[in-house]
Image (tube, grey):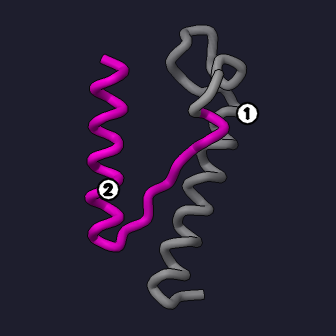
Amino acid sequence: MERSRRTLNQRISRFIRFKNGVVVRHHRLEVDNSGFLLPDGVHLNDHGLDIFLDGLREGVVQALHSLGGS
């Protein structure tokens, strides 16, 4: 399952970049992210959510810059 997820993410990322889109990676959440999860092991805790949302914000800023925005 994990290998399939990684393959799918890689193919979609390649396609998005091919279409001149922006791919947001959450490097800090890709490694041992157990400290960023709630006890259910699935959902992000407040700190993990902050990291995730910061990554989305940076991706939006990057996309705006690539489109010539401010």
Position of 42 relative to 16 (above/below): above
Where residue 7 appears, x then y in whole percent? 30, 35
Q: Residue furthest top?
A: 39
Residue 33, magenta (yes or no): no
Position of 61 relative to 8 (above/below): below
Position of 5 relative to 39 (above/below): below
Earlier in the chain: of badge 2 and badge 1, it is: 2
Residue 23, magenta (yes or no): yes
Q: Quadrant of the N terminus?
A: top left
* Residue assigned mark 1: 47
* Residue at position x 28%, y 26% in the image: 4
* Residue at position x 57%, y 32% in the image: 30
- How far, Cα to Cα, is label 2 from label 1? 29 Å
Q: What is the three-letter code of the residue carrying label 1?
A: His
* Residue at position x 35%, y 52% in the image: 13
**Mark number, residue 14:** 2
Where residue 28 appears, x then y in whole percent? 66, 38
Q: Residues within 10 Å of mark 1 (few under 14, many from 20)?
A: few
**Mark number, residue 64:** none
Q: What is the three-letter code of the residue carrying label 2?
A: Arg
Q: Nearer the viewer, mark 2 or mark 1?
A: 2
Q: Viewed as shown, does residue 27 lie left or right of 9?
A: right
Q: Secondary structure at mark 2?
A: helix
Q: Quadrant of the C terminus?
A: bottom right
* Residue at position x 60%, y 52% in the image: 55
Q: For this rendering, which residue is in front, 40 or 66?
A: 66
Please provide the residue range marked out in magenta. 1-29
Q: For this rendering, which residue is in front, 49 or 13?
A: 13
Q: Are discs 2 and 1 less than 8 Å apart at CB?
A: no
- Which of the 4 image quadrants contains residue 33? top right
